[in-house]
Amino acid sequence: MEQPALILDPNPDHPVWRRQLFEADFYLFKQWTLDSKGSGLPYTGDSYCFSLVFSNSGQIKFDLANKAYELHTGYVVVEKGHNYDFRLYPATGSFSIIDFTDDFYEQLLDEYQLRHSSFFGNPNALTLGLRTTPVIDYLFYQLWQPGGEMSRLGRDQLVLQLVQEVVGRIENHDPNEPLTLYKRFHLNSIEQAKAYLHREFNRDLSLLDLADHCCVSPFHLGRLFKTHTGYTPYYYLVSIRLAHAERLLRDTALPVTDIGFASGFNSLEYFITAFRHRYQRSPAQYRKQGPL
């Protein structure tokens, strides 16, 4: 498939390369890439009613609805959208934006009974930054880098799952949880480690494999990964595998045994036990009855 064209912002003081990756009936998926040269410039956004902003690489500093954010891997910024100003500052990196239609937002509020929730029901809360989970990271990675053609239906389903996971995270997050900042070297290591786990989750990986890929010691990587994500590398990997297995159970007719091995589990018994622990049902029951 031919890549969408990159559009350079006409103001040379702050180059922003913008790409529209794909558009569906209820959302628009965009990617912005920043150049560190130039001065921060204000942009007035005519945003949709509801948007999700994810970091692809680097650390992006911006002001949104009079609130400052430092966006990097492991965090998502949620916008309710009120045509407010935002200011991007010089940085090197890229991020993705998923804009949703007004109709979708209204349906979302009703479907999940969010009109009186602490965030969606608060007219003074316009934006929110929160730490992601391994499942959110997995869904976004599959959406952003699917590794091939994806049907419209498959992509729409991924987006709906992503929204569902983010909404669940919003309703259960700690409002006092800070957005932790990291040195550029640390951020590079985390980005490399997470990308490697998302690409190679179906292989029998070791901590040494992961550390060698990131060019750091296993001890340093283990501590850094847990500090940044809130999870050990092993827990993060198992979570990716279970999310992939859940998707295959729902979207394919593959046998449970094949799904377990395709998701990186080398023991059917362990796969069933881990899946039951996470989803409160065995893989076979989940396929028949869906989530609780």
Image: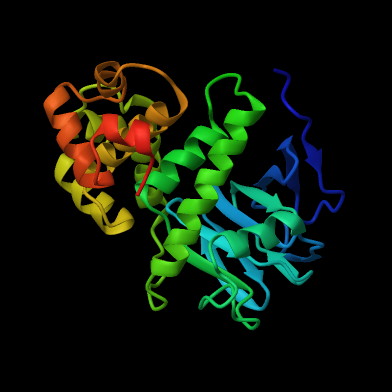
Q: Residue at 21% of width from left, 25% of height from top?
A: 265
Residue 263: give x, y in percent of width and height: 30, 25
The quarter of the displayed image where residue 46 is located: bottom right
Q: Nearer the viewer, residue 230 or 247?
A: 247
Give the answer, above or below, for where 55 lies relative to 147. below
Instruction: Spot the residue most to the right.
Output: 10
Residue 195: give x, y in percent of width and height: 40, 35
Q: Residue at 37% of width from left, 52% of height from top?
A: 133
Residue 61 horizontal side relative to residue 26, left or right: left
Residue 216 appears in the rendering: no
Q: Residue at 64% of width from left, 70% of height from top?
A: 63
Residue 6 horizontal side relative to residue 51, left or right: right
Residue 193: give x, y in percent of width and height: 33, 38
Instruction: Spot the residue most to the front.
Output: 289
Colour scheme used in the picture? Answer: rainbow
Counting labels gives 0
Q: Nearer the viewer, residue 59 or 114?
A: 114
Residue 153: give x, y in percent of width and height: 63, 30
Residue 292 horizontal side relative to residue 160, left or right: left
The quarter of the displayed image where residue 191 is located: top left
Residue 104 appears in the rendering: yes
Give the answer, above or below, for where 167 lies relative to 262. below
